[in-house]
Image (cartoon, rainbow, N blue to C red):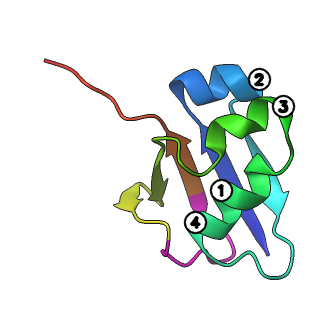
Amino acid sequence: MNVKVLYFASLREAIGQPGEELELPAGVATVGALRAHLAARGNGWQALAGGRNVRAAVNQRMVGADEPVAAGDEVAFFPPVTGG
């Protein structure tokens, strides 16, 4: 199953790219599993590791780690943002 993954702000800087099209391996069916899969790449990808404050959206809707990921979805990861 293919998904589009986007990285924003400091995640984009750590990872070194704004996004990618990704074929998900078997067993990666939720946002949390996708995040763990990406973090396992090592180096800059550790910015997505568990325990770090990272938000996620699927198809521009904020979601939790247990949100299912389907073929064709757009999954975005970004650090929390503050403003005023």
Residue to which mark 2 is pinned:
16
Could you say where residue 55 lies in the image, as x and y percent from the top left? 44, 47
- Which span of residues is magenta-colored? 66-74
Give the CA separation, mark 3 to mark 2.
11 Å
The amino acid on which the numbered mark 1 sits, given as a three-letter code, is Arg
Check the picture and name the quadrant holding the N terminus: bottom right
Residue to which mark 3 is pinned:
43
At x 49% / y 75%, what residue is drawn?
A: 66
- Tell me if I can see residue 17 in this picture: no
Give the CA separation, mark 2 to mark 4.
21 Å
Residue to which mark 4 is pinned:
31
* Disc number for residue 17: none
Label 3 environment density (alpha carbons within 10 Å; few <14, some 14–19, many ≥20)? few
Of marks 3 and 2, the one in the foreground:
3
Considering depth in this image, is 45 or 24 the residue closer to the camera? 45
Q: Residue furthest left?
A: 84
Considering depth in this image, is 67 or 39 the residue closer to the camera? 39
Q: Are marks 2 and 4 in contact (CB under 8 Å)?
A: no
Q: Are marks 1 and 4 in contact (CB under 8 Å)?
A: yes
Task: Judge from the rendering whether residue 15 lies leftward or rightward of residue 10; answer left or right.
Answer: right
